[in-house]
Image: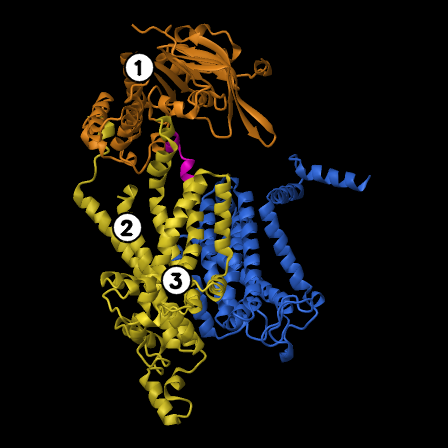
Chain colours: A blue, B orange, C yellow
Amino acid sequence: MTRSGYFNDLHNWLISEDFTSTRQARLHKAYVAWLSLLANPLAFAGFAVVILLIIIATLAPIITLYDPVSQDLTIALKAPSAAHWFGTDEFGRDVYARLVYGARTTLYISILVTVIVAPMGFVIGAMSGYLGGWIDVVLMRITDIFLSFPSLVLALAFSAALGPGIENAVIAIALTVWPPIARLARAETLTFRNADFVVAAELQGAGMWRILLRHIVPLCAPSIVVRLTLNMSSIILTAAGLGFLGLGAQPPMPEWGAMAASGRQYLLDAWWLTTIPGIAILTVSLAFNLLGDGLRDIMDPRNA
Amino acid sequence: MRDPNDTILTVENMSVEFPTLSGAVTAVRDVSFSVGREKVGIIGESGSGKSTTGRAIMRLQPPKAVVKADRIQFENIDLMRASEEQMLSVRGKQIAMILQDPKYSLNPVMTVGEQISETVILHEHVTRKQARERTLAMLERVNIRDPRRVFDLYPHEVSGGMGQRIMISMMLIASPSLIIADEPTSALDVTVRQQVLSILDDLVTERNIGLIFISHDLNLVRSFCDRVIIMYAGRIVETVAAADLDNARHPYTRGLLNALPSLDHPRDRLEVLRRDPTWLEN
Amino acid sequence: MSIAQTTEQSYPDSRKLLSGLRKIATSFAVILTTLFGLLVITFIVGRMVPADPVIAVVGDQADQATYDRVFTEMGLDRPLYVQFGHYLADIAKLDFGQSHVTKNPVASDLARVFPATLELATLATLIGACFGVPLGVVAAVRKGTWVDHIARVVGLLGYSTPIFWLGTIVILVFYAKFGLIPAGGRIDIYNEGLVEGPTNSLLIDSLLAREWDVFWSAMHHVITPALILGYAAMAYLSRMSRSFMLEQLRQEYILTARAKGLGKRPIVWRHAFRNIRVQLLTVVALAYCGLLDGTVLIETVFAWPGLGQYLTSALFFADMNAVLGSVLLIGIISIAINLLSDIVYRFIDPRTR
């Protein structure tokens, strides 16, 4: 059997709708989603950039020549050149290296926030929708209170109170991102709350947590994933904003927002200090938005 | 007297196709019929293409659909070849369409009176005051008592039966010569159906115009219409006068008739329609 | 009289009045609880601060006796809920504490800077709405064409651009390179302090006083930050109005309108658009609140003397009273805007009457 023949057979197996096992059905779904993603060039571009980001962040030590934190004032504020692709900053640090390591910071923040927010938002929202009654009212009031603050301002307030530092920034951002997820989880739970299969499970004696985990989570997961992907861009922008204001990651740790902020003083002479990190933020943010849009179109083609 | 031979609409070989990922789906295939100053019913199950046919005649098919026909002759215009501009002056003024559920087919944020007046202002360029008078007169004509009060109501404030009568007013106020009614009573309570149908009947007879009545309810159509066209899988399988319906020959029609319960001829078992794939061949 | 008609009679007026009152009361309860929650949060945030508030007042050279005295004076020895009670009482008296940077009561600082932010945010929202909504509507009507694609790209860029960076780049290009715009501030020094008006909005006051020079200078200064913020608002609003419009165009009543023989323009504007007015209002209010985020950053970049800049310099100097006061004020503004849009929404939508 030739290699291309194998792939061909695999493709046909995945595409066919005569399922012989749950595993095949799941793989089929994933494969169809992957094909749709491929068919949407913008979304695929976003996906590619995100993968690139992860690769760059992982391979940071390998793909940079200079250390991002060591200072050398003799070569400070040099324009982009062959030696320093993106120039040097006011302390003589290689901007390219700081950019690459800054990707790590960005990823670190994004992943941590997502890991906190997804379960937290889901649990609060699903419990609220499932149990109803005064629990629902109280939890939704709390969600509304958090929603009533603009997110950067709230993150600012928490960050200021907790003190500078990247972990505190993560907590602050997470506290502003969970409300929409909770709302979404609640809405999805309510849709299925009175569905026959849920009632059947309850009659069989399944407790709330079992129902939530085994039945509701798989149903909510797609829209929560989409929402999280779309939110990723605003997480990154908020983190950059916090960095710009001096909160969040502290020097000498490279962070794109902080780099843009410190570059402002030298704006007229060394434009690359602010411009380049900003472009990086823009690109990654855009990539997540494109990916999120594409995912949403896959889930709900009517909105295309 | 009504002259069914005075043909208003002639449809020749109309087809409607929808492009899908796995090739084109034919919703309507080679349909030909004509309508005079009479009531013609189009009967079919879901997916038979009856609604699509009705909309295609007015060129209101969904944007992705492709309509092909030799001719769709309406009075002196070939609708198939008419420009969109010409169609704008045909719709509402010469051909009208009544939709199924007034809950959805009426604009929720415009008053009832405003929506009806809009038609007559659009086609006859009357003033708002004149339009209001015409609307009130039309509302009375469809047996709505206290038309002045109803004029200012919003669609969610009226019942289903009244909503359909408002729909009828809206579509008939500019005196079209052909009405296409797409399941006009399917969303109504049984008690209200007769009221709406009798109003429709009165208007059609009084104005001597044609009516295409699309429905899935055979009993309703056979008592209301003059002629019945039966559609299956996008094709016309039989055309017969309503009075002659019991003598229909096509097995699908016979199957439909046999599936109807009857108080006069009670049976122990109702027949289940057996679909013969040969009906799908041309 | 048909049965259908009798069931459609409107309630006698007193019943409608009662249900209306009940709705208003529920809204008020919601607002109050949200406000209360806001205060709880700011109180907690204030207490979480690692800095010692007593030291902030007495300095770190003070002896133990002074420290204890101030400690009791500030009520810090009382249980938390009593402290919260004092906090609420203070807020009700509009006492947000004192800023140790400006040495003024925070409340008076806020009153000074707040109108500038209001001016900027309102102008930006107007720009965003006037450009964003028609763009979204056109994109929906011409879905799939190049207009739609351009609108989506413009929107996407607006969503993804870090606003502080955009502001900085604009200053770099248009001020440093082309000298078209001022470097920042609200008005140039020649015209400063010339107009003292009732609304504290330089644009409106100078118009009222017919001081054209002042007006142009103010406009010259406000237009760039307002355009940048407006762009962000426009991205959001065009996306939302496109989505709302698409949803409407799928509805049955659009088919009815077409069957009547209406052309595209009346269908889009007289029928579909009327149905999204309410939703648009809600998102415009949301956009306004979202802009309050952006003003914090933009005011810093453009040295605009508003709430945002006050907040960031307070952060820089660790002036917690000022930080909390500003945050609280922003939260209150958000609630107020949502409340306002709710009230107007009740008036416009016939379905809720």
Determine the CA span between mark 3 and mark 2: 21 Å
Residue underneath mark 2 = C344
The one nearer the camera, C171 or C85, is C171
Determine the CA span between mark 1 and mark 2: 45 Å
Q: Subunit of mark 2?
A: C
Residue underneath mark 3 = C292
Which one is earlier in the sequence, the residue at label 3 or at label 2? 3
Place of residue A256 in the rendered image (x, y in percent of width and height, measured from the top left): 56, 66
Place of residue C346 in the rendered image (x, y in percent of width and height, measured from the top left): 28, 48
Residue B220 visible to the viewer: no
Q: Which residues are magenta?
A: C247-255
Residue C331 visible to the viewer: yes
Please name the amino acid that badge 1 sits on: Val
Q: Subunit of mark 3?
A: C
Q: Are marks 1 and 3 in contact (CB under 8 Å)?
A: no
Identity of the residue drawn at 30% across and 38% down: B109
Residue reaching furthest to the right: A1
Quarter of the rendering containing residue C256: top left
> Disc 3 vs disc 2: which is toward the camera?
3
Checking the image for residue B204, the label placed there is 1
